[in-house]
Amino acid sequence: MQLLEAVESGPVNHRVEIFTVPEFMAGYLGIDLAQPLTPDVWLALAQQRLRTTDGGAVYHDDVGLEAVRQRLAWYPHDVWLYLLAAGWTRIGQEEHLMGRAGYAGDEIGSALIGARLVRDVMRLCFLMERTYAPYPKWFGTAFRQLACGPELAPVLEQALHAQSWQAREEHLAAAYETLGRLHNRLDLTERMPEQVRDFFGRPFRVMALHGFSDALARAITDPAVQAIARRPLIGNVDLVSDNTDL
């Protein structure tokens, strides 16, 4: 880490570095702008870095920066569908576990799973609104700025503050149903249910079990993305790991 210091004479370490646009993108994103951005490349790019390249104003552009920003502004359509399917898959893998942990007497485990589900709901909202998510410090702030933020943020806060798995489930179920409505407004698949259901007859309310992931995966037409979607729907680097260094 370097901190700025005032100097009155001698050399100054101004910490200003000059790059061409291709050099910057190669160093910051690890991409070669002269090459196509294939689906696997898109999935290896962290959203917070894509958000950085797309954010802020450009006041003068003689080097083609705006064209590059437009190229990186959002995922190709079928990569987007794949990421939405992966987001629903994550919810489906754990939405029933929150209640089951609480039912077994493990409120700490239930609360932890509930918090993970809150984050997955928020991530899915960023994807639905075609907005790259920032890194953790600004994640909640940026979420509130989404169109769905004012409606969902209070519900998710209640889920995080709930003192029992039953109360936690009530608020998460409300959030899931909002996700269902948001999904249908996108008109990407056949119309999907907007109400939670029981988990195979057990007293735990779930949403992803309706098949959102499968419906989104069926809508993919790009053969390269279809090949990826035939494997487990693990998503992009942000969904695979939250390790800061990775």
Image: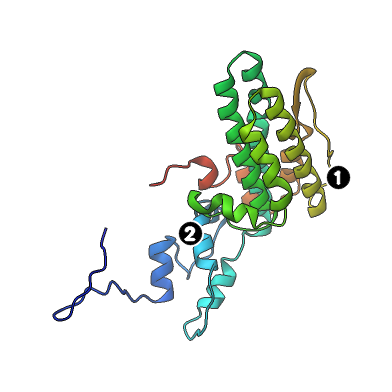
Point out the image quarter for the N terminus.
bottom left
Residue of label 1: 191
Of residues 235 and 170, the one nearer the viewer is 170
- The residue lying at 53 percent from left, 71 percent from top is 56
Of helix, strand and loop, which one carries label 2?
helix
192 relative position to 82: left or right:
right
Q: Quadrant of residue 142?
A: bottom right
In front: label 2 or label 1: 2
The answer to whether any part of residue 230 appears in the image is no
- Against 165, is 38 above or below? below
Measure the alpha-carbon separation of dots 2 and 1. Answer: 33 Å
Indicate which disc, 2 or 1, sits on the residue closer to the N terminus.
2
Of helix, strand and loop, which one carries label 1?
loop
User: Badges 2 and 1: C-beta atoms under 8 Å apart?
Assistant: no
Residue of label 2: 49
- The residue lying at 63 percent from left, 38 percent from top is 118
- Against 17, is 138 above or below? above
Q: Percent from the top left, x then y, of residue 157?
A: 64, 40
- The residue lying at 76 percent from left, 49 percent from top is 219
- Against 58, is 77 above or below? above
Q: Percent from the top left, x then y, of residue 123?
A: 62, 46
Within 10 Å of the Cα at label 1, are there few (<14), some (14-19), or many (20+) other Cα atoms?
some
Q: Amino acid at mark 1?
A: Arg
